[in-house]
Amino acid sequence: MPTYLCTSTTGRLTSEQKSKIAGEITKIHSEVTGAPAFFAQVIFSEVKAGDWFIGGAQLTHDHIFISGHIRAGRAVVDKTRMIKLMSEGVAQAADVKNGRAVWLYLNELPPRQMIEFGQVLPEPGDEPAWTAALPEQDRAFMQSLPVAT
Amino acid sequence: MPTYLCTSTTGRLTSEQKSKIAGEITKIHSEVTGAPAFFAQVIFSEVKAGDWFIGGAQLTHDHIFISGHIRAGRAVVDKTRMIKLMSEGVAQAADVKNGRAVWLYLNELPPRQMIEFGQVLPEPGDEPAWTAALPEQDRAFMQSLPVAT
Amino acid sequence: MPTYLCTSTTGRLTSEQKSKIAGEITKIHSEVTGAPAFFAQVIFSEVKAGDWFIGGAQLTHDHIFISGHIRAGRAVVDKTRMIKLMSEGVAQAADVKNGRAVWLYLNELPPRQMIEFGQVLPEPGDEPAWTAALPEQDRAFMQSLPVAT
């Protein structure tokens, strides 16, 4: 039920690295929040180094930027722990020289302002009852989606 | 006064479908919130299926993701109703096989932290007084913009 | 410690204009908030005019959209002043015909939900103590980054 947008410079990440990063983010989000893994969305986009500035100067060092959008309602301590784990996991998956290369922001949205698979999302913790109450066809579709392990 | 970012896989949406989707979003946002239609911004971008993951696995099913950024201050019930209407309207405009293809998130921002056409935005409901108080030239410009009907 | 995403139509901004815009945003953010300039990230992306709609109609006028993501905790009056200065600075740097061309949104995130250079960010105002407490290697890296003046 979260979406993570991952931005890197053109050609920086291989397909294999993207796949690893998506797997890491999905696994960590699911482990820390308890949300089902089949909802985690990760989208990659690329930007030319000439279109990327830090401190007003063109980007010259290794750098990956991830912007996450998750349901509101988790403990602060869990969210901070989660972004630490993710930034380390992404750094490793992307084979960066050091952990300083990864920036990660976490934005929160009220679940009632999010629709996935045609359904308004439940509050954190209410996933089991929500899943049980889904129309059979929708639940079957969600559970049929491939999930990386 | 809202912005909706619509992401689809490369080549998924025709120009006509994009136009229809923008029209649907604009119309529904305006009808539910009462905000003037000439402020609704819809931006489309495309992502290769190989750069898009759900559940840690590469995207294989039909899927459209919309991220809306609106002024804070509306009733919860209206916002939930709005995203339901929008996800249905977009599903139809995009000719998706089923409503499960559309994900839609709604992020809220304080109007005082938003500038459009050079003007800090009013609170929801204050649009008429705000419009009346605009410099004549600015109001004329906004009202001269084409609005799809 | 903020990120600003700047969207314009394909070919609208020259490299020089992008550099000027990044410089303006970085300078104003730093002056108004007191945050160190080396953390300000500005990313440019382009969209075809045919993929951009306002009022449900395809974009035909000069238009630049900036979406800022900053740490929560500043005074409302400062944030509004900042976006006014930025929209004016960007309009000038982009050589737009009038200030109406620039839209700017400011989204706020809790600093504890943001990681930069491998470090969870401090609350606004706590930067000096935070910087002093960094591992020597990390502090040296950050301070070695080029900053436009």
Image: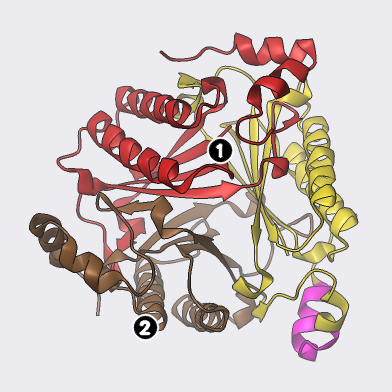
Chain colours: A red, B yellow, C brown
Residue at mark 1 to residue at mark 2: CA–CA distance: 36 Å
Q: Is residue B146 visible?
A: no
B137 drawn magenta: yes
Q: Which residue is mark 1?
A: B46
- Amino acid type, mark 1: Glu
Going 84% across and 64% down the picture, which residue do you hit? B35
Q: Which mark is residue A1?
A: none
Quarter that holds the N terminus of chain C: bottom left
Q: Tag 2, which chain?
A: C
Dividing the picture into quarters, in which one does residue B136 lie? bottom right
The x, y position of residue B86, in whole percent, is 80, 41
Residue sitting nearer the eye, A101 or A85: A85
Going 24% across and 80% down the picture, which residue do you hit? C149
A6 drawn magenta: no
The magenta segment is B132-144
Q: Can you say whether C59 is above or below B55 in the image? A: below
